[in-house]
Amino acid sequence: MVPSVRQNFLIAIVAVAIAFVIFLLGHPSRSVDQHSNLTVKMVAPDFSMPELTGGQFQLSAYRGKIVLLDFWATWCDPCREEIPHLVELQSKYRDRGLEIVGVSMDDGPEPVRDYYQRFKMNYPVVMGNAKIGELYGGVLGLPIAFVIGRDGRIQSKHIGATDISIFENEIANLLQN
Amino acid sequence: MNHTFEKHNLVLATWIFPILLVYVAFAYQATLIPSSQLISPDELAKVLRSSKGEKPLMIQVGSHVLYSQAHIPGSEYIGPAASEDGLQRLRKRVEPLSRNKFIVIYCGCCPWSHCPNVKPADDALQALGFSNVKVLYMANNFGTDWVDKGYPVEKGD
């Protein structure tokens, strides 16, 4: 009756299964192209805002590049988890024409500046507001990301935590075209 | 038998309990709010539509940028209860109220399991002795679980 190696193995599998379920509970499945008045293939609404680090950001100035427009906030845990992966993605694909743009939905810039420096964010970040949120169909929950093609049209919308491999596959495909 | 039982307990302690402890440590606290204290969007919408019964004081305890885009009509913005400032504003707002006042708090900034605001707000109200507090359960966020479902919203401050 002493637990055998097999029993230990079974318990380990149960433990891993529990951990996997916990992971899924903590990372709700993402959906694409939901909850928006915007539709895929529409031209992404243009906006201009001061960049966090100085200078003026204008979305339409990035026409010709693939843009990943990431609505996030420092208080949003799934958003924070994505940032290091987005930094990697930006480094990997910048030369091929990717530009990631962060739109922070924080109520003020102080925590964003701190986060920007701490995580060595390597792409432009602007402070969002209700007007920009409404332009994009209402940013009423985070994170939300839009992938925008070289022609400035929205290719997809991702609501909730999105695995970086989903972004990468989509971006790599768009960069090939 | 006792020996076997102890061995099994040891295995459980070795494999399963640490995982559960890690979960408890990292899980966002919203998941720890008792289900008896939750109110669904559908239930709240019915309460708001009904001509009978007490209408709740509704308090949004999330970000102002989200509130100004859309919020439940009649609800008040207090600010993120994850911050001490937000909690103080909440305490100040409810301080003069009867402790059996029907209060609904909501956020919807993030998926429920990641919301940093509703649990601290609920804790603060419980600590002040409020006995009729409900927390609006939104599995995904305010947009998906309230706005997209066609429940009433208004914009602005």
Image: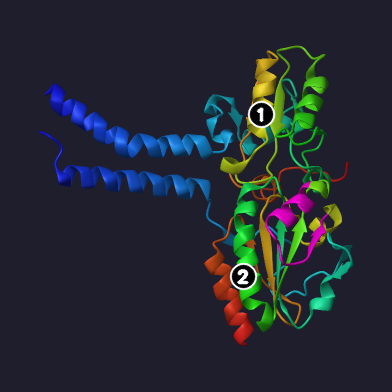
Magenta stretch: includes residue A50: no
Residue at the image position 40 percent from the left and 49 percent from the top: A20
Q: Amino acid at mark 1?
A: Pro
In this picture, residue A8 sits left or right of residue B74: left
Q: Is residue B54 above or below residue B66?
A: above
Looking at the rendering, which quadrant does residue A93 occupy?
bottom right
Q: Is residue A11 above or below residue A104?
A: above
Can residue A12 be seen here? The reply is yes
- Rendered location of residue A44, percent (x, y): 77, 71
In this picture, residue B118 sits left or right of residue B70: left
Magenta stretch: includes residue A119: yes
Residue A89's disc is 2
Residue at the image position 59 percent from the left and 69 percent from the top: A167
Looking at the rendering, which quadrant does residue B119 occupy?
top right
Q: Which residues are magenta?
A: A111-128
In this picture, residue A115 sits left or right of residue A165: right
- Rendered location of residue A68, percent (x, y): 69, 69
Residue at the image position 82 percent from the left and 33 percent from the top: B74
* Residue annotated with mark 1: B120
State whether discs 2 and 1 lie on one chain.
no
Q: Nearer the viewer, mark 2 or mark 1?
A: 2
Assign a secondary structure to mark 1. Answer: helix
In the rendered view of the protein, which quadrant contains the N terminus of chain A? top left
